[in-house]
Image (cartoon, helix red, strand yellow):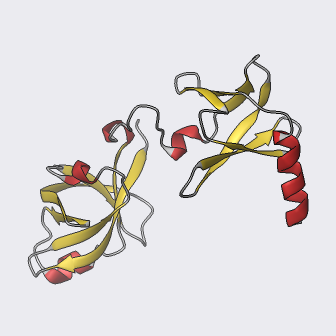
């Protein structure tokens, strides 16, 4: 069965007829337009419940959803803080050459001759570029910029990232970590 992925969080009640303002957790706001059902996980409950939608649309900087059977301000208020989820198979595909962070985590990282360097344990993002945090086969942490100069191939099918390293890249990661401790 597909995993569920977070697309939004219920933040406010809109009006008095049960509409919820949803903070989008998706890079694709249009994905909210016309949704017919979602899974809702309330903050105090571990299980997500499938719910039909009477409406779903993206307006300005937020989504508006009307859950079927939620018809008043108080009913809607009981959903504040709830996660809005969809099946992974319903996720909007990212543009060519871009990837979801959670699809990169856990991938094997190999160099251009096929030697395993380690596994991606996290992806750090900033305004300029993302950094792959890799737990190396010898237990060290390697930081590799997620840019074309280093990342030569991402194979989502085999869950493998091929990188081309330059002299000093791994040693520079070690020195930065030593300075932080």
Q: Position of residue 88 (x, y in %)?
A: 38, 40
Residue at 79% over, 21% down: 115
Residue at 23% over, 71% down: 21
Q: Residue furthest top?
A: 113
> Above or below — where is 143 with respect to 116?
below
Rendered-image quadrant of the N terminus: top left
> Above or below — where is 3 with respect to 109?
below
Residue situated in front as seen by the camera: 91 or 125: 125
Residue at 85% over, 34% down: 167
Residue situated in front as seen by the camera: 29 or 163: 163
> Above or below — where is 93 with respect to 61?
above
Residue at 40% over, 47% down: 4
Labels in figure, total: 0
Q: Position of residue 145 (x, y in %)?
A: 66, 43
Q: Position of residue 35 (x, y in %)?
A: 18, 50
> Above or below — where is 147 with respect to 20?
above
Task: Determine whether, in the image, residue 38 is placed left or right of residue 140.
Answer: left
Rendered-image quadrant of the C terminus: bottom right
Task: Determine whether, in the image, residue 40 is placed left or right of residue 67.
Answer: right
Q: Position of residue 110 (x, y in %)?
A: 73, 26
- Image quadrant where residue 40 sits: bottom left
Task: Determine whether, in the image, residue 118 is placed left or right of residue 47.
Answer: right
């Amino acid at each position: 069965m597909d995993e569920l992925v977070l697309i939004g969080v219920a933040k406010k009640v809109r009006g008095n007829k049960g509409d919820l303002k949803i903070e989008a957790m998706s890079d694709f706001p249009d994905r909210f337009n016309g949704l017919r059902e979602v899974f809702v996980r309330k903050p105090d409950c571990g299980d997500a419940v499938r719910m039909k939608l009477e409406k779903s649309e993206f307006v300005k900087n937020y989504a508006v959803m009307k859950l079927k059977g939620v018809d008043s301000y108080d009913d809607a208020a009981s959903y504040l803080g709830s996660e809005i989820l969809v099946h992974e198979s319903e996720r909007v595909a990212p543009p060519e050459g871009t990837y979801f962070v959670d699809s990169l985590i856990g991938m094997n990282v190999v160099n251009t001759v096929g030697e395993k360097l380690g596994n991606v344990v996290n992806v750090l993002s900033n305004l300029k570029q993302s950094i792959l945090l890799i737990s190396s086969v010898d237990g060290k942490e390697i930081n590799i910029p997620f840019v074309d100069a280093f990342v030569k191939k991402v194979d989502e099918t085999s869950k493998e990232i091929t990188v081309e390293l330059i002299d000093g890249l791994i040693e520079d990661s070690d020195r930065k970590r030593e300075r932080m401790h």
